[in-house]
Image (spheres, rainbow, N blue to C red):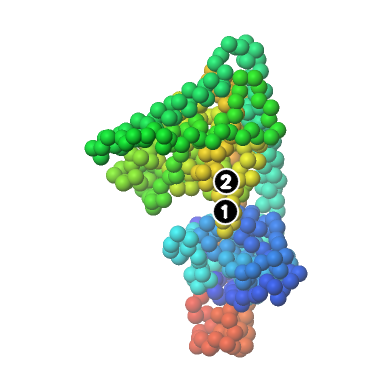
Amino acid sequence: MSDNGREREGWIVVPLREVVEQRSERADPAANAGLPFVGMDHVESGSRRIIGSVPSENMKSTAKKFEHGDVLYGRLRPYLNKVARPDFQGLASAEFIVLRSAGSLSPAFLEYRLSAHDFVSYASHQGEGDRPRVSYEQIAGFEVAVPPQPEQERIIDAIDELFSQIDAGVASLESAQVKLDRYRASVLKAAVEGKLTVDWREENPDVEPADELLKRILAERRKRWEEEQLAKYEAKGKKPPKGWKEKYKEPAEAQPTEGIDLPTNWVWATVDQISEAVRYGTSAKTSAELAGIPVLRMGNIQEGKLDVKDLKYLPDDHDEFPGLLLQPGDLLFNRTNSPELVGKSAVYEGTPQPCSYASYLIAVRPLPGCLSSVPTFFLNSPHGRRWVSRMVSQQVGQANVNGTKLKSMAFPLMPLEEQHRLVEVVEELLSPQEAQVMACERSVTRAERLRQSILVTAFRGDLVPQDPADEPASELIKRIKAEREASGNGGSGRKGRKKRKSPDPNQGYTLIPKSPDE
């Protein structure tokens, strides 16, 4: 292995299977009461931190047992950057591959190696399907450069020191983001409670009150329903039957949210009352090819806004179009996500155009008289978050709020002129905050790139100086391989497997030669 023409003395390149073993035995949680159980949600993506656990006896599904120093590697494609090295004994979800060092590779070095972008990319291309699971056999062929053990320790110490400096900077950024999030929440809370437009109401006492506005919205809602029904009868060449208008279903009245006293001229309204359509998005398979109609997904909703940098596409002639094309002013509601993110919402402002949306989103098309920003402010406010938390149903680690529940949500509706003023005030207050959030996010992204740069430098041998006195890794691996074969393990990580015939102790390895000067 070389970099810029320089060779790493004493290093050796081997398949991962030669330096790690898989703990594949299953464990019954009930029989291991008292041990902590680590699930996928308990390992933080990208940070290698274990942020929680539950008692094993609380779990019903089978698990894998791990020992102190083992490395947990998430085998589901969405979680391929979930790597952790517990400093305790316990049980792990069966969605982890549990790895132990075969003796020639430090567990800490292995943990960092599995976190590097080249390995994550390699693993991400293994397996197929909507929720592909990567197996040990699929990742075991990845070739890893192994330094001498003393050099591994020096590399680990250097990475730890550099990462701790980055962690301190990221912690400061995250603290700033928390403060910005709190500020945003306080602005939206004040907005839906009427505190941001107190002066405007005093200066404009004679506007149409919201209860009269709501009556007009409801009348328009019924009118559009009747027009739609007549169009259906006409398309079939039929006349509407007697009493057909009586089939119209009036939306239920709004139930006020506790803790909010509405200002004079405001009224409670439901999403059902103010909308002409509430529709789920498409479940059709999309493509990353930059052709066709862009499809917004739940990841495109960030901080109450739409982020359209990462898009997928459907063909222009997709059979759900034009019915599932968005119109400017549509409200997008994330109906399924992790519990802390379900319910996040944003307004489609018309960019990109045309545009559709995926099945985990619900589009609400408001009737004239209600700006979609108003219910969006409520959904993203602390009051709306509490409503979402009461409405969610849990499904295999995901929270869900369906369209029926969304239509029943009550929010404060104010006079139309006040709606326009409220949108202006909120934008004035939040625009500087959004710029600061974006700056923080860019800094965090740069920090992650710096981490990966450090790992690349480390694993090509340029992070720490070498010591000619270090025993070459090839000698250590030969001894460990001989011991494993003598015990009948054959280098497979599973006892009882037949020994492999290998007259050449270096068969299957790539030796990294010493320098000509040595």
The residue that appears at 41% across and 34% down in the rendered structure is 246
Mark 1, residues whose alpha carbon is within 10 Å: few (<14), some, or many (≥20)? some
- How far apart marks 1 and 2 lie (CA) works out to 8 Å
> Where, by quadrant of the figure, is residue 266 drawn?
top right
Q: Label 2 crowding class (10 Å Cα cut-off): few <14, some 14-19, many 20+? A: many
> Would you identify the image quadrant in which residue 10 lies?
bottom right
Is residue 356 among the parts visible in the rendering?
A: yes
Q: Nearer the viewer, residue 261 or 245?
A: 245
> Is residue 349 at all visible to an observer of this figure?
no
From the viewer's side, name the closer residue of 152 and 1: 152
Give the label on residue 390, or none: none
Question: Farthest front residue?
Answer: 242
Assess whether mark 2 and mark 1 are in contact (beta carbons under 8 angstroms): yes
| Residue displayed at 70% across by 76% down | 31
- Against 108, is 419 above or below? above
Q: Position of residue 234 (x, y in %)?
A: 26, 35
* Above or below 366: residue 264: above
The type of residue carrying mark 2 is Val
Q: Residue furthest left?
A: 237
How many discs mark residues in the rendered view? 2
Residue type for callout 1: Gln
At a point 66% along the width and 74% down the height, the residue shown is 28
Question: Which percent across, then down, holds residue 38?
Answer: 67, 63
Q: In the rendered view of the protein, which quadrant contains the C terminus?
A: bottom right
Q: Which residue is mark 1?
A: 398
- Report the front residue among 133 and 169: 133
Q: Which is more N-terminal, label 2 or label 1?
A: 2
Q: Nearer the viewer, residue 162 or 75?
A: 75
Residue at image point 50% right, 66% down: 134
SS label for mark 1: strand
Q: Position of residue 281 (x, y in %)?
A: 43, 45
Residue at the spot of label 2: 342
